[in-house]
Amino acid sequence: MRAGLEIVDTGPLATVQDLGRPGYADVGVSTSGAADRASFRLANRLAGNEEGLAAVEITFGGFTARALHDTTVAITGAPCPITVDERSGAMNSVLRLPAGAVLRLGTPHTGLRTYLAAHGGFDVEPVLGSRSTDLLSGLGPPPLRRNDVLPVGRTAGLWSPVGIAPVAPPPADELTVRITPGPRADFFTEDALRTLVSEPYAVTSESNRIGIRLSGKVLSRTRCEEMPSEGIVLGSLQVPPSGQPTLFLADHPVTGGYPVIGVVLSTDVDRAAQARPGMVIHFAMN
């Protein structure tokens, strides 16, 4: 039997992700890929892989899998309790799963998304050159389900594992991310821009891999006419008529019809992707 993991439980959501499928925005397909790319890349490095091999993105823990063969894995991102059978495991380190061992990930202490990489990567069928699940377009493999088997790719060459990486956990209550003015900042009052960088915005439960809906002080506009749809990039802060911004994440649409007041820096989007509902985000002009 080929090496792989059998899914016993997925938790709220578990998807296969890599670094996405860039280059298809002109046909309506966003890049998608891991929401927290820094944690994803680290998981692969720890597992002895190239950074772009497919891994599992686990939202809010509750994930369980059984190793079908001896398997080497690494777990990064939102820190959670880890057990291999009855033994405790460590985040951000190399873990050995003997054949038949059961890996369990509990609820994260902080953060939202945890990454599981296996040495060799998860060898599911690619779509448009990527193994990522895109929840908006439906491209890629479907979200994982109980009894699914994730095959592990074959490895070649020498392996020099990192072993362990000291990583600070995501913040628990508040997060500050940097922004630059958006292409439609002129649609808003000067007070709106000042409000955005001085007032807190709470992450609502209406958030997912597509975007984070925020709740806070209304961002007022000077121009209220309808505008044609325009291109949307990762990290865009789009403001609908409600005046409450949405921060777009990995599975964002490629176009949008509401003005973008600002864009979060790419490195800070990774940090924002770990914000769970109820957390407060502060924006700082870069």
Image: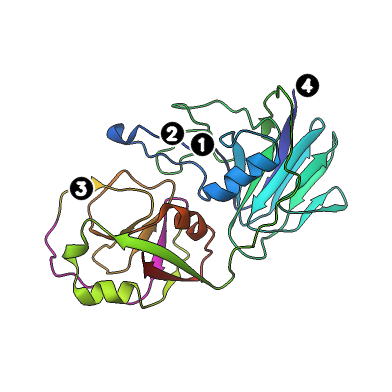
Q: How many marks?
A: 4
Q: Characterize the local packing of mark 1: few (<14), some (14-19) or many (20 or more) Cα atoms within 10 angstroms.
A: many
184 relative position to 112: left or right: left
> Pointers 4 and 2 in contact (CB under 8 A)?
no
Question: Residue 193 magenta-drawn?
Answer: no
- Name the amino acid, label 2: Arg
224 relative position to 80: left or right: left
Picture coordinates of residue 55 (x, y %)?
61, 39
202 relative position to 49: left or right: left
- Name the amino acid, label 4: Met
- Which mark sits nearer the N-terminus, 4 or 2? 4
Q: Is mark 4 on a helix, strand or loop?
A: loop
Q: Mark 2 points at which residue?
A: 21
Of tags 1 and 2, the one toward the viewer is 2
Up-down: is 103 above or below 213? above
Measure the C-alpha gap from mark 4 to mark 1.
Answer: 25 Å
Q: Residue 132 carries which label?
A: 1
Write down the quadrant of residue 26 in the picture: top left
Look at the image and give the residue range highlighted in magenta.
208-226
